[in-house]
Image (tube, grey):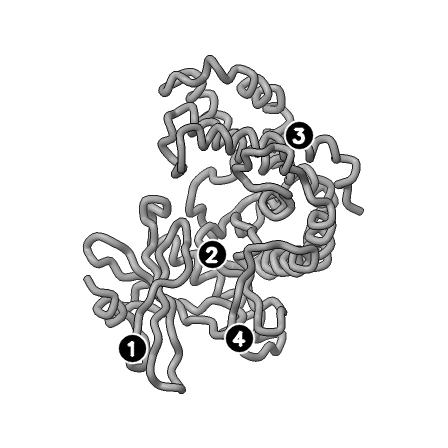
């Protein structure tokens, strides 16, 4: 089905003059839908990856609840230009929050004019992103609707260890024997790295509504560099705040690439770490427990360890989950993440937050 035919199934206004690919998302395919009338909005059309997000109705209901709650808070604060400060879901003409064409699921948002994102990170951007993600969590701390897991056990370290141990036991690709050192390094940290789940079961650590993909390019900025809103809400679900904090540090404060072949490039940028933590605590401290704040630095190690385990598990399984660009890519990713983890461990004393 052509994109112009797809958009006709949604409650849009205006005359469509063009539909063109937008960005290079790893999960969903996005298209900018432009209209001819000046008083009519443009739209964002997305094909939802239903192989990852298997329950599309649950996914879309989550997003509607989250954006609706944020919109309500913005109105209560007297904010202006609200359609640029949260995503707006456009329903299909049958009232559903998506359209199924027989093969693929599609959704539409209002397009946020003038919004821009950044891939390169600076301390200033890290600080702004920290404030944005902290405010996002704070805003959703009292959401009345139940938000469900869109990817079950996504940041559950105990679950990731089960997957890892199954992969070691089966050794489907015959790669375990030559990587015993990595297996031992992962196992030696397993007890400590699964303590968040245990602490949660003890009732000392609450689950909150997390973003679960806290990268700087998931924060939209206006023309003056001020934060507009947090975007890419597919993974918004219950979790421990240490995971959201740690995920940003793992990606944003790494001086090297996630799959850097030169391990000398890989370390934690303390300026990025400190700036993000400062911004985050500015907006999140009011609802966090002392134990949650205490565990935030651990979150940086936890998510780096988790990604090490996930890359290596996929390598042992024969590269069945992550796309690879060359043989051994997942092993290279594993080693780069392990190097970052070791640097975070070496600098623990410098990561303590007040």
Q: Earlier in the sequence, mark 2 or mark 4?
A: 4
Where residue 304 sits, quadrant-wise, is top right
Residue located beneath label 4 in the image = 82
Closer mark to the observer between disc 1 and disc 4: 1
Residue located beneath label 3 in the image = 342
Q: Badge 3 local density, few (<14 within 10 Å), some, or many (20+)?
A: some
Would you place residue 95 above or below residue 41 in this image? above
In what element is the residue under mark 2?
Answer: loop
Q: Earlier in the sequence, mark 2 or mark 1?
A: 1
Q: Badge 4 local density, few (<14 within 10 Å), some, or many (20+)?
A: some
Please give left or right for residue 88 compared with residue 259 in the image.
Answer: left
Residue shown at the point (58%, 38%) measured from the top left = 303
Q: Nearer the viewer, residue 221 or 141?
A: 221
Residue shown at the point (69%, 44%) measured from the top left = 269
Q: Earlier in the sequence, mark 3 or mark 4?
A: 4
Closer mark to the observer between disc 2 and disc 3: 3
Quote the CA–CA distance across marks 2 and 4: 17 Å
In what element is the residue under mark 3?
Answer: helix
Quote the CA–CA distance across marks 1 and 4: 24 Å
Quote the CA–CA distance across marks 3 and 1: 52 Å
Q: Residue 233 carries which label?
A: 2
Q: Badge 2 local density, few (<14 within 10 Å), some, or many (20+)?
A: many
Residue located beneath label 1 in the image = 16
Residue shown at the point (56%, 51%) measured from the top left = 214
The answer to whether the residues at label 3 and label 1 have Cβ atoms under 8 Å apart is no
Would you place residue 75 above or below residue 247 in this image? below
Q: Earlier in the sequence, mark 3 or mark 1?
A: 1
């Amino acid at each position: 089905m052509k994109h112009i035919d797809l958009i006709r199934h949604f409650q849009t206004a205006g005359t469509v003059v063009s539909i063109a690919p937008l960005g290079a998302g790893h999960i969903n395919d996005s298209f900018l839908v432009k209209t001819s009338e000046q008083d009519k909005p443009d739209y964002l059309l997305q094909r939802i990856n239903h192989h990852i997000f298997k329950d599309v109705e649950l996914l879309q209901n989550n997003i509607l609840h989250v954006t609706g709650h944020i919109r309500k808070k913005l109105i209560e604060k007297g904010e202006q230009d609200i359609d640029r400060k949260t995503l707006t879901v456009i329903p299909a003409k049958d009232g559903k929050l998506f359209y199924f064409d027989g093969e693929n699921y599609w959704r539409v948002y209002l397009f946020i004019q003038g919004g821009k994102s950044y891939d390169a990170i600076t301390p200033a951007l890290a600080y702004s992103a920290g404030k944005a993600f902290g405010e996002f969590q704070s805003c959703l701390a009292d959401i009345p609707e139940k938000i469900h897991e869109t990817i079950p056990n996504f940041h559950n370290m105990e679950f990731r260890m089960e997957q890892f141990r199954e992969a070691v036991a089966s050794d489907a690709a015959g790669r375990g024997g030559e990587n015993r050192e990595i297996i031992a390094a992962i196992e030696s940290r397993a007890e400590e790295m699964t303590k968040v789940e245990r602490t949660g079961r003890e009732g000392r650590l609450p689950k909150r509504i997390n973003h679960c993909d806290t990268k700087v390019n998931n924060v939209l900025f206006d023309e003056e560099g001020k934060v507009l809103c947090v975007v890419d809400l597919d993974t918004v679900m219950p979790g421990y705040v240490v995971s959201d904090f740690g995920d940003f540090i793992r990606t944003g404060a790494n001086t090297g690439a996630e799959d850097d072949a030169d391990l000398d490039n890989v370390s934690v940028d303390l300026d990025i770490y400190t700036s993000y933590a400062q911004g985050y605590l500015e907006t999140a401290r009011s609802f966090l427990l002392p134990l949650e704040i205490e565990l935030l630095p651990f979150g940086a190690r936890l998510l780096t360890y988790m990604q090490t385990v996930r890359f290596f598990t996929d390598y042992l399984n024969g590269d069945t989950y992550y796309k690879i660009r060359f043989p051994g890519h997942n092993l290279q990713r594993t080693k780069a993440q392990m190097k970052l983890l070791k640097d975070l461990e070496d600098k623990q004393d410098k990561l303590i937050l007040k």
